[in-house]
Image (cartoon, helix red, strand yellow):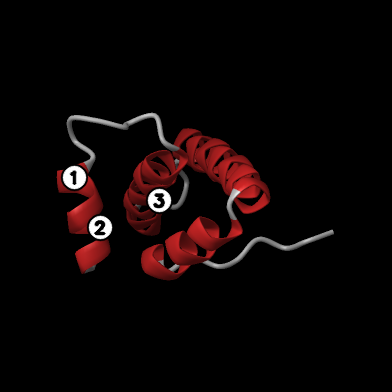
Amino acid sequence: MTKNSFISVISHEEKEENRGSVEFQVFRFTNKIRRLTSHLELHKKDYSSQRGLRKILGKRQRLLSYLSKKNRVHYKELISQLNIRERKTR
């Protein structure tokens, strides 16, 4: 896993305060997703971990959708700094 400066900055700044912010929750879900993805590369038939990964992906997708509606600038910054794809619009 590679950590960029944004991840280290947000993790140090947000440890004590503002853990409920959408940006911090997306950051935490992204770390969990990366950790589960690397786990599933080794254990391909771990179906309970696959289910957990899908649940976390859905939660992150809903949070990103909310953030894109409320504050498009923060959304763009967050997806570029966490290096994740932009959600598809319907």
Q: Residues within 10 Å of mark 1 (few under 14, many from 20)?
A: few
Q: Is residue 3 visible?
A: no
Give the label on residue 7, or none.
2
Three-letter residue code for mark 2 = Ile
What is the spatial separation of the Cα atoms under label 3 and label 1, in whole angstroms?
17 Å
Secondary element at image label 2 = helix
Residue 41 in the image: x percent, y percent? 38, 59
Camera-nearest label, 3 or 2? 2
Three-letter residue code for mark 3 = Thr
Give the label on residue 37, or none.
none
Q: Which residue is mark 1?
A: 13
Three-letter residue code for mark 1 = Glu
Residue 66 in the image: x percent, y percent? 63, 43
Secondary element at image label 1 = helix
Q: Quadrant of the C terminus?
A: bottom right
Sequence-first tag of 3 and 1 = 1
Sequence-first tag of 3 and 2 = 2
Q: Which residue is mark 3?
A: 30
Q: Quadrant of the N terminus?
A: bottom left
What is the spatial separation of the Cα atoms under label 1 and label 2, in whole angstroms?
10 Å
